[in-house]
Image: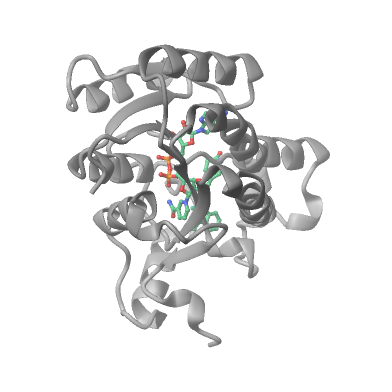
Amino acid sequence: MLAGKLGIVFGVANKRSIAWAIAQSWHKAGAKLAFTYQGERLKENVEELAGTFGPDTLLMPCDVTKDEDIANVFKTVGEKFGKLHLLLHSVAFAPKEALEGEFVNTSREAYRIAHDISAYSLVALARGAAPLMTEGGSIVAMSYYGAEKVVPHYNVMGVAKASLEASTRYLAYDLGPKKIRVNCISAGPMNTLAARGISGFTEMLKHYEAHSPLKRNVLPDELGATGTFLASDGAAAITGQVIYVDSGYQIMGM
Ligand code: NAD
Ligand code: 0WE
């Protein structure tokens, strides 16, 4: 379904990362992928995972808060790939203390960091990728229901995801004439590194099992399949959307 497509993946930390699930699905569908990693701490992990797609898999460091890292990534992709069709944004961060107390106590700095890493980065990456997407493209970002309804403790991340979803719509408008589509996947809770240590996370998984229409949690492969659909020509008229892959939880009023 993605034969001949060239893609870049931001947000693999380990084998449980949502980015890795979508990367595997893109790879199986025939795409050739490049990967970035946040810093030296994660380099080895990503090297090992990306290496399973072949020893020559392009791998680059990228801290999305650094304009020079982003510039280097797209310069290298331009040199090695020449063009680009797919981009996955699967990156989020808020300082831990901002996810613990009350939202009303969010510091200016925690608010800034959460928005810089989790929302502005999509704009910066889209701007870097667009000149290489000369044959059109598909940009996919990961969101969560806390963008539209209050999820206790998700706090400033919910506000940043609202910004990510709105940014998706404005990017879709700007890049539409270039046949570049921009969409979000809003995933149900997944047991990843970003979810570890969040108090009450196990209860949240149980809550989805009890209350979602499908009465179960979401599997990584199901996020992969949706990522591949959004990347494929089957989704050629879909842009600016938030697609819920959440066992139907989002439709419930109670
Ligand atoms: P994860 O920890 O595996 O992935 C988060 C990634 O963000 C990591 O790879 C990390 O290196 C990267 N990152 C953080 N700060 C960065 C920076 N400054 N520069 C570059 N990269 C940076 O966790 P995940 O659950 O796979 O999260 C991926 C995405 O999915 C996030 O956007 C998250 O909000 C979203 N999401 C997660 C869930 C869930 O329940 N796990 C649900 C819905 C949406
Ligand atoms: O987007 C996320 C989590 C993103 C995240 C996680 C962390 C943990 C470690 C962002 N920043 C940090 N900072 C850290 O220091 N999710 C959708 C998963 C998640 O996180 C929650 C949730 C859910 C679901 C936090 C509180 C309540 C629900």
The residue depicted at 56 percent of the width and 42 percent of the height is: 178
Is 42 positioned to the left or the right of 104 in the image? left
In the picture, residue 212 is in which quadrant? bottom left
Name above or below for residue 181 compared with residue 218: above
Is 150 positioned to the left or the right of 246 in the image? right
The residue depicted at 51 percent of the width and 49 percent of the height is: 181
The residue depicted at 64 percent of the width and 25 percent of the height is: 65
The percent coordinates of residue 103 (x first, y second) are: 74, 56
**In this view of the protein, can residue 161 be seen by the observer?**
yes
Q: What colour-coding does the image apply?
A: one colour
The percent coordinates of residue 94 (x first, y second) are: 62, 41
The residue depicted at 64 percent of the width and 67 percent of the height is: 148
Instruction: Out of 202 and 147, give the one closest to the viewer.
Output: 147
Instruction: Out of 60 and 49, give the one closest to the viewer.
Output: 60
Instruction: Out of 152 and 183, give the one closest to the viewer.
Output: 183
Name above or below for residue 32 compared with residue 212: above
